[in-house]
Amino acid sequence: MMHLISLVAFPVFLLSLLTLGLKGDLFSSAPAVIACQVCGFAIMLWSRLSFPRGSFSFGAKPVSSTIVTVGPYKFIRHHIYAGAMLILWGSIAGHASIANAGIGLVASLFTLGKIVREERLLRASLPGYEQYAHSTKAVIPFLL
């Protein structure tokens, strides 16, 4: 079941953004929403650029035997997901409704499932990941 959740998490997230976009609720002129989305995108970009060339994969399975601990990975382990959630929930905060909160909840639950799946794979396949996981937070610096 967790493998299935991991596989569909990315399409579900994209569908969530597409749905918000089609509803006109993805972007906002509110400075707080813009700040959340710009920060989310910057975090995702910084995270992606922190990977050594050829070692990044959209799948959960590691393509390298090296744990990335530079850049934002000094502080949290799942920056790309954290940045994506910042973009999504920034949009939802700017266009608050029960429907949008439901969209965000579904996308967040699938993303959480993907994180759990990746954590299991990384702990099982990368020596030293367990220690790294104990010294860094998963998604929110200093909290979670």
Image (cartoon, rainbow, N blue to C red):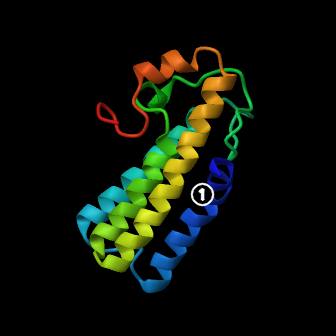
Q: Residue 76, how many percent across, how many down?
A: 43, 32
Q: Residue 33, how many percent across, how many down?
A: 30, 65
Find the residue positioned furthest to the front: 1
Find the residue positioned furthest to the left: 31
Element marked by disc 1? helix
* 31 over 52 or under it: above or below: below
Quarter-of-image position of residue 12: bottom right
Task: Check disc 1 and give the amino acid type.
Answer: Ala
Quarter-of-image position of residue 53: top right
Residue drawn at (40%, 71%), measured in percent from left and top? Answer: 102
- Say if residue 129 shows up in the picture: yes
Q: Residue 141, how many percent across, how many down?
A: 33, 34
Q: Residue 116, how many percent across, how many down?
A: 54, 41
- Say if residue 51 shows up in the picture: no
Nearer-the-camera pick, 136 or 99: 99
Nearer-the-camera pick, 71 or 8: 8
Residue drawn at (62%, 48%), measured in percent from left and top? Answer: 2
